[in-house]
Amino acid sequence: MKKMDVLPAFVALLLGGLLLLTLFILSTTTSRRKRKRKPCLPPSPAGLPLLGHLPLLGSLPHRKLQAMAEVHGPVMLLRLGRVPTVVASSSAAAQEAMKTRDLAFASRAPSAMATRLLYGRDMVFAPYGEFWRQARRVSVVHLLSPRRVQSLSFRRAREHEAAALLRRIHIHVNSSSGVVNLSHLLISYARGVISRAVFGNHDYELDLDGEEDGGGGKKLRKVFEDFEALLGTGTVGEFVPWLAWVDTVTGLHARATRTFRALDSLLDRVLADHLAAKRRRDGRLTMVGDEDDDDEHRQDFVDVLLDVKEAEEKAGGEVQFDTTAIKAIILDMFAASIDTTHTTLEWAMAELINHPHQMRKLQTEIRAAVAAAGEVVTEEHLEKLPYLQCVIKETLRLHAPVPLLVPRQTLEDTELLGYHVPARTRVVINAWAIGRDRATWGHDADEFVPERFEEDDDVLNIVGGQQDDFRFVPFGAGRRGCPGAGFAVPSIELVLATLLYHFDWELPPPAANTGGVASSTLDMTELYGLSVRLKATLNLVAKPWSPRLST
């Protein structure tokens, strides 16, 4: 009888055990399946509560992000306050984001300061959509096409401003023992070139609070300096909303308001002047797109945009390019062109000062090509200067004009080097880190060696549209690549050749440059903003040179 009682108990215990084992197996399998289905996000360094990784970026975020990428890999996930941000720091990651999956990464991350200063209607910061497509088409086809960039009027504008720069340097040479504030003069040159392209031959000064500029456009220059600085400033509020009051207390909002009003007033006058000239003109301008009409080459950017607006109005459809959009795109052109041109020229001259062998090699090439034809550098000489191209490429590799390319935003869930990137994630491409990647460029990646481009004919054509080489990406690539690269590069080439043909350059005496402390090299410390520029003013001694003086 006792044996009979034990058997049912044993069976019940066995069945219970089997049931528990089955439940355990099912639970484990389901958990594994869930883990497999869970997206694999990029690695993320340790951050701080509420602020995330924002305080870790420091004053030179491109350098800090490069150091973090060396530890955590070429794709990282950061939390900038409340904003999830993926950072790409390798050529492979850049190629996937800007070519392979270009459409998924084609929108723009919102920028509070850009919205405030650019009317929320510009091209550079516009989200992916119909307005952006039309703005991009107009910029690429009508404003910045190779035909227009190489047109006679634009070439004359570049050569006129290069000649004006030359005259200013000679004035400094004759009045200040040869010491030239080249930083200031290069900014003036860059602004002069884009002003002629945008406004034509009109000279505008600024009227603030009823007080005229007083000649020389000093107030206008100051407003554009503030505009460029503000555009490169992220507001605290967009990353950490509960600290938005900081932007008011620091005066950031007030400064942005003053700058916006000044520029808006200026652009109203510009548009009024161009419309009046358009009405006075005998007959109407040929519609934009008629490539057989030479008058297109005599139009400035404002004329072209007004023609586009008029064409849309006549077509009877929705007018994408109203007055507000035209103002915003004009400011885009100023922001992109001025910074790209003058910072690249400043870094090129700084590197050449610190590398006299390369400077002499480049001067020998330029002087041999120009002296045979005369004593003025023209754009016809540029195609005969291959080492000049190498110097500019090496400068852009080491000193990308915008080291952290304008942030993108994903349109949909996508991947980057195998990591999951959710829709509406901010994406930052560290062009500065990509240009200095030792895995790509070798042990001397941080050194100025223009000769590396003599040995590598397949490397990026910096003014070519479609890009297959992502070893350095100074102007971005893909749908959101900079359409103005072809406009900026001839301006850089011409003036750099002009500076090095007409003058020998060197550091000033110690008392004038370093407070009496002798230095054989220029301080290359960076200052972060809309672009990363040289922190120290580029004060150099210019010694005039000509073929007659050298014989």
Image (cartoon, helix red, strand yellow):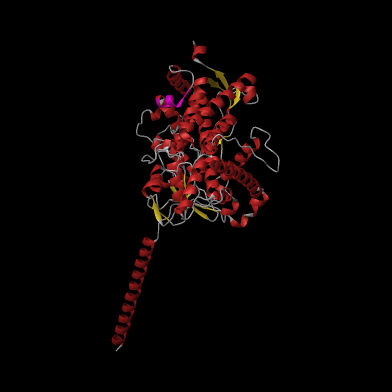
For the image, the number of numbered tags is 0
Q: Is residue 381 magenta?
A: yes
Quarter holding the N terminus? bottom left
Query: Would residue 508 be found to the left or right of residue 442 on screen?
Result: right
Percent of width and height locating residue 381: 43, 24
Front position in the image: 496 or 275: 275
Q: Is 472 included in the stretch rendered in magenta?
A: no
Range shown magenta: 377-383
Pick the front one: 453 or 62: 453
In-front residue for pair 319/102: 319
Give the percent coordinates (x, y) of residue 299: 49, 38
Residue situated furthest front in the rendering? 282
Furthest-bottom residue in this view: 1
> Can the viewer see residue 232 in this picture?
no
Residue 148 in sight in this render: yes
> In which image quadrant can residue 522 be found?
top right
| Residue 5 location (% of width, % of height) | 31, 86
Q: Residue furthest top?
A: 551
| Residue 524 x, y percent position in the rendering | 55, 31
Toward the viewer: 250 or 154? 154
Q: Examine the residues drawn in magenta and state their main secondary structure.
A: helix
